[in-house]
Image (tube, rainbow, N blue to C red):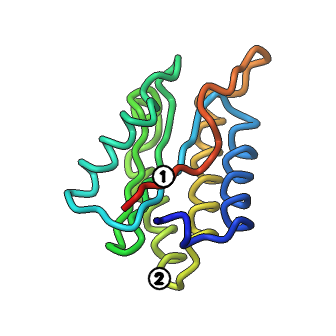
Amino acid sequence: MAKELFTEEQIKYIEQAIGEAEQNTSGEIRVHIEKRCKEDVLDRASHVFSLLEIQKTELRNGVLFYLATEDKQFAILGDVGINAVVPKGFWDDIRDMMVDYFKKGQFTDGLAEGIKKSGEQLKSHFPYQTDDVDELPNEVSFGKK
């Protein structure tokens, strides 16, 4: 199971990064990790996006970080609300920064930094509202494969 690839401390660190990134925005961030991706990574990430119901946020401003560790594949998917406002190439810039971490085997730090960068962009376009509700859980989800 993919959860075995991360220590409890690493999982808590990633979840803390999600919580901190969401403190200043109405946007929502999810992380899903599994060992294998037996299809196109964007297709799989889109399927997970739907399974985790990220598309159900009120402002359609959810983001998914999908990572298949053994296949060395990952994707970042933003919902239509955020994709309509972030600058062109934004997700590519975050992806490239994360790849630098991943090449060094620093998956936890790479995920945390990607989450923080996403949170900054979400904050500028979807600032925190006083009546904000945390619409999605901050827990990392894991695939069985």
Q: Is residue 27 left or right of residue 51?
A: right
The residue that appears at 66% across and 36% down in the rendered structure is: 123
Going by the numbered disc 1, the residue's amino acid type is His
* Residue at the top extreme of this rendering: 131
| Label 1: few (<14), some (14–19) or many (≥20) C-alpha neighbours in 10 Å | many
The residue that appears at 42% across and 61% down in the rendered structure is: 34
Do the residues bearing badges 1 and 2 touch, measured as CB atoms within 8 Å? no
Q: Spatial distance from mark 1 to mark 2, Cα to Cα?
A: 19 Å
Among the two numbered marks 1 and 2 on one chain, the one whose residue lies closer to the N terminus: 1
The mark found on residue 103 in the picture is 2
Q: Nearer the viewer, residue 107 or 96?
A: 107
Q: Nearer the viewer, residue 136 or 119?
A: 136
The residue that appears at 51% across and 68% down in the rendered structure is: 97
Total marks placed: 2
User: At which x and y percent is residue 131?
Assistant: 76, 14
Q: Is residue 125 above or below residue 4?
A: above
Q: Nearer the viewer, mark 1 or mark 2?
A: 1
User: At which x and y percent is residue 42?
Assistant: 27, 51
Q: Is residue 15 above or below residue 63?
A: below
* Residue at the bottom extreme of this rendering: 104
Q: Secondary structure at mark 2?
A: helix
Using the rendered view, name the quadrant where residue 108 is placed. bottom right
Q: Which residue is mark 1?
A: 32
User: At which x and y percent is residue 139?
Assistant: 63, 46
User: At which x and y percent is residue 76?
Assistant: 42, 51
* Residue at the right extreme of this rendering: 130
Going by the numbered disc 2, the residue's amino acid type is Lys
The mark found on residue 117 in the picture is none
| Label 2: few (<14), some (14–19) or many (≥20) C-alpha neighbours in 10 Å | few
Q: Secondary structure at mark 1?
A: strand
Quarter that holds the C terminus: bottom left
Q: Is residue 48 above or below residue 2?
A: above
